[in-house]
Amino acid sequence: MPLLPSVFHPFYGARPAGLALLCRRLSVLPGLVLFVCCLFLGGCLEGRLPEGVVATVNGEPIYLRTVQALLDGRSAALDTMQRPSLENMKRQYGDALGTLIIYALVNQELRSLQIPVTESAVESAVANVRADYGGEEELARFLAEESLDGNEWRLLMRDYLAMQSFEKRVLLPGIRISLDSVRGYYKRHETEFNLPETLDICLTSAVDRQAVDNFCASFASVGPVREEQTGELLLQCVEAGAAQLPNAWQKGLEKLAPGQCLPPRQEGDRWFGLALVRRNPAHVMSVAEAYPLIENILREREKEAAFAHWLTAALSRAQVRVNPDLVADLLSPVSTRAAGRNGTSGGSAAGVAPGGEGENENQTGQEEAEGLGAPAAERPGQGTSGEQGL
């Protein structure tokens, strides 16, 4: 059932929206940014760091426990288990450290601009997540179940807010999207604005079939009601294409008129129903209709480029020390790591050894930065080479 798991998220134990958003945004690393940062960090690898410290950024430590907390948060966000191999663990720790190095640079930049994330902002964000869970005890229980340390989780929340603030107050003010660029994009991608028919539908679920039938009777007589979640009935109204719905429902929808319902279907111990609100016919979006969508796409591109430019400059100025035990995994792209496993490569990536500088690291890093194209809207933190400290 392609649509139901995302629509009926109360049935599937999804975590509240506030924490889910935080975990999701803290869980994604754009690979090109990571590679760029790895190259720049090549000359910053030094001797042993204090116990528990995996890296320092301009003297600020990043702790192993922070790296582990970020990894735990990613596992909680993805709800998946990866194959527990040594290579996977090394890669994950390296990616996590890279993310935390970027967080450190961003926080330092905000402090230098005298716009740091305040404690009140952190507490407000934590309070929103706490409310999502229904109270302090429920949130604490979730963190414990996912092996997330509460203090480290708050630090990650601060990093998330720092990335939001950096995007809003540093990157976006310098971005302007012209009408000509919007029109040019529309002309080059005109076929993408041919929209197929979509359906406004209301999906219902209840243990008792009578509750679904009662909703359908009410729907037919007075029209759709507001979304609700009660002990008897769960309801969510969405816009979707017919192809997104279960095959058994698609055929019935062909002859269904707005205001009518399909017969309820039972799955497991619940009954599911579908009510059709309206049909939205296929059409071609005009430039005016598509303008906000195109503007957002172009703004994201400009934002990615602006962040890559800033990151390149910040790394060139930064004094970053990384635990030498992590060198091989932080300073090599995935393809190089794979070659190394097959015995075809040795030493550090980019011609850099711990404590030494690669001849072409700045040039190569700049080339990668100029080609950066990974979306940044859903990524408050973007990875550099190194570990995270939570």
Image (tube, rainbow, N blue to C red):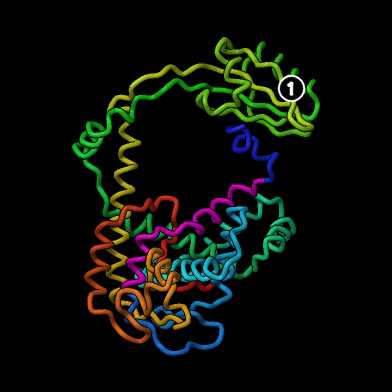
Q: Nearer the viewer, residue 270 or 135?
A: 270
Vertical side of 308 occupied by 357: above or below:
below
Residue at the image position 32 percent from the left and 81 percent from the top: 43
Identify the main secondary structure in magenta: helix
Percent coordinates x, y for residue 42 in the rendering: 33, 78
Percent coordinates x, y for residue 121 in the rendering: 52, 61
**Residue 298 horizontal side relative to residue 332, left or right:** left
Residue type at mark 1? Val
Q: Is residue 17 magenta?
A: yes
Q: Which residues are magenta?
A: 14-39
Residues packed near mark 1 inside 10 Å, few (<14), some (14 to 19) or many (20 plus): many
Task: In the displayed orientation, state which residue is furthest to the front.
Answer: 343
Task: Classify mark 1: helix, strand or loop.
Answer: helix
Q: Which residue is mark 1?
A: 212
Question: Residue 305's quadrant in the figure?
Answer: bottom left
Residue at the image position 52 percent from the left and 25 percent from the top: 243
Q: Is residue 282 magenta?
A: no
User: Visible in this render: residue 81?
Assistant: yes
Vertical side of 93 occupied by 243: above or below:
above
Image quarter in which the C terminus is found: bottom right
User: Visible in this render: residue 108?
Assistant: no
Q: Nearer the viewer, residue 326 or 218?
A: 326
